[in-house]
Image: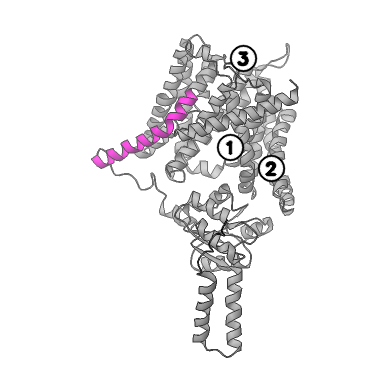
Amino acid sequence: MSHEMSLILTLTGGLLAALVLGLAAKRLGMSPIVGYLLAGFVIGPFTPGYVADGEIANQFAEVGVILLMFGVGLHFHLKDLMAVRGVAVPGAIAQIAVSAALGAVASHALGWSWSAGIVFGIAISVASTVVLTRVLADNRVLHTPTGHIAVGWLIVEDLFTILVLLLLPVFYGPREAGGPGLGLTLAVALLKLGGLVAVAAVAGRWLLPRFFGHVARTGSRELFTLAVLAVALGLAVGAALVFGASMALGAFLAGMIVGQSEFGARAASDALPMRDAFAVLFFVSVGMLLDPVTVLPQWRLELATIGIVLVGKPLAALAVVLALRRPLAVAGAVAVALAQIGEFSFILASLAAGLGVLPREAFNALVVASVVSIVLNPWLYQGTEALLAWLRRSGRFGARPADASTPTQAHRDAHRAVVVGYGPVGRTLCRILREAGIEPVVVEMNIETVRALHAAGHPAVHGDASRRDILHHAGIEEAESLLVTASGLDAREVVAAALDLAPDIRIVSRAGYLSEATAQRRAGARAVFACEGEVALSMAAWLLAALGATDEQIDRERERVRRELFEKPDPAPAAG
């Protein structure tokens, strides 16, 4: 079989198997990640039937790791971490230390070296970003103090893991005989890291905003998406070739500097489909490593790993949060949300295995523990919530704090309206909202308009409002109203995306033609104003005034035109 055909079959087989088993897992109430891991097992070398090319799958997985790390960097905001640093930083460090200790003791008892056990323990200390955010969002606590603590905690874990990814090759990589000692090697590595950070900072401050601004002004979405991917992959590869750092670290820095710019929301939205596709292939490649023949003989390691993930980690988190004088409701929610492992665990284990630090059976234990914890985590979270609710009703501990699971009033009031488009209509509506004491968030595709709004001190997001990620950045979940004023876009997609994120939001939209107004109302818009109808109303009023009609006659005719144009029943479908 030719290399080209093997590549196509591996890509097609991996995606198809992931789609089928991901859908099956979702139908069973599980995370699709479980399906992706099982898909890798199905097309792997340890099951009959089609066997995908492992080398090609690993190459796809490398791209998946780069894009995953780029996505983590895009969503990394230092201010969010600083807001919860009093809990997230000591909590994450303590939990990592407990996991590393438990992993080292359990694996050493099974014959591993202490260093391998510590690395393994660190690998299982890191929760999955995908799973954690999904569980918090499904339970409507992602944008609450509890959610902020959990996400900040996860960011600290990710940053610590990135540091380990940087240092592992220094300590365990090959060194030439007579070469520099470990101390000098470490110093050189840290010096290179400083150079990489400095270059990334300069690029993020001066070069990338100008580059993305130039691409955005072309008006081509394809070119902007291509620019995002080129920056992510280019900086990742450059970090490896020039500075000797991992491509994962370069991708994280690229995402972080892009995410802090005015293009962060749009970059996250446009890169999301490609990132998700390759992330799926990353999980598929991990599933291909599962050898069922060795699962049963290694049951003690797998059981110990599951115990650390589902019992050791959450108990450590619970103890730390309670010791820091946070309510039991917050401590329980944070602890259970972190009781799982995912993508970073496999990234770290892959590097450690390549350096000869971890044995092969570590992957089996990680895959088994990942599947079990990902399957159980949503149910454990809901069960914990139900238990805490019962304890509150029974008076076993004080009333639940108002901010433990619901947004604070200040947070709800921060983004009360989202306005899509800042043309003449959008500017007028924004002025009226500001005069009423409401600061709207504007979503606009024109980057110059966004920059002007930022310069004036008004919040604005650059991107396509039909993308859920863009609406999320605009705070649609906390908004009371969405005003779609832009022309030249399919308002139905914006309405559908908004209602998916905020089912109770009040939507008012603009339509170019009366025929579009009906479709927008069906999509869920509460009120639709069609340009055709409004022009007809204005021209009719002007004509009547010119003919000498009274104000009462003009108002009566306005109502008649409004009924004729806006309130007529939807046309019946044509007979087939």
Residue 509 coordinates in the image, percent (x, y): 55, 62
Work out whether 552 lies above or below 350. Answer: below
Neighbour class for label 3 at 10 Å: few (<14), some, many (≥20)? few
Residue range in magenta is: 369-398
Q: Are marks 2 and 3 in contact (CB under 8 Å)?
A: no
Between 330 and 559, the one nearer to me in the picture: 559
Q: Is residue 557 left or right of residue 424?
A: left
Residue drawn at x 50%, y 18% as measured from the top left = 365
Q: Amino acid at mark 1?
A: Val
The numbered mark at residue 228 is: 2
Q: What type of secondary structure mainly makes up the magenta span?
A: helix
Residue 180 coordinates in the image, percent (x, y): 71, 17
Q: Is residue 392 magenta?
A: yes
Splitting the image into 4 quarters, where does residue 59 fall? Answer: top right
Neighbour class for label 2 at 10 Å: few (<14), some, many (≥20)? many
Q: CA distance from mark 3 to mark 1?
A: 27 Å
The numbered mark at residue 72 is: 1
Work out whether 162 lies above or below 541. Answer: above
The secondary element bearing badge 1 is classed as: helix
Q: Is residue 536 left or right of residue 526?
A: right
Residue 155 coordinates in the image, percent (x, y): 53, 36
Q: CA distance from mark 1 to mark 2?
A: 14 Å
> Dot 3 corresponds to which residue?
356
Mark closest to the chain's N terminus, 2 or 3: 2
Splitting the image into 4 quarters, where does residue 430 fall? Answer: bottom right
Work out whether 216 lies above or below 125. Answer: below
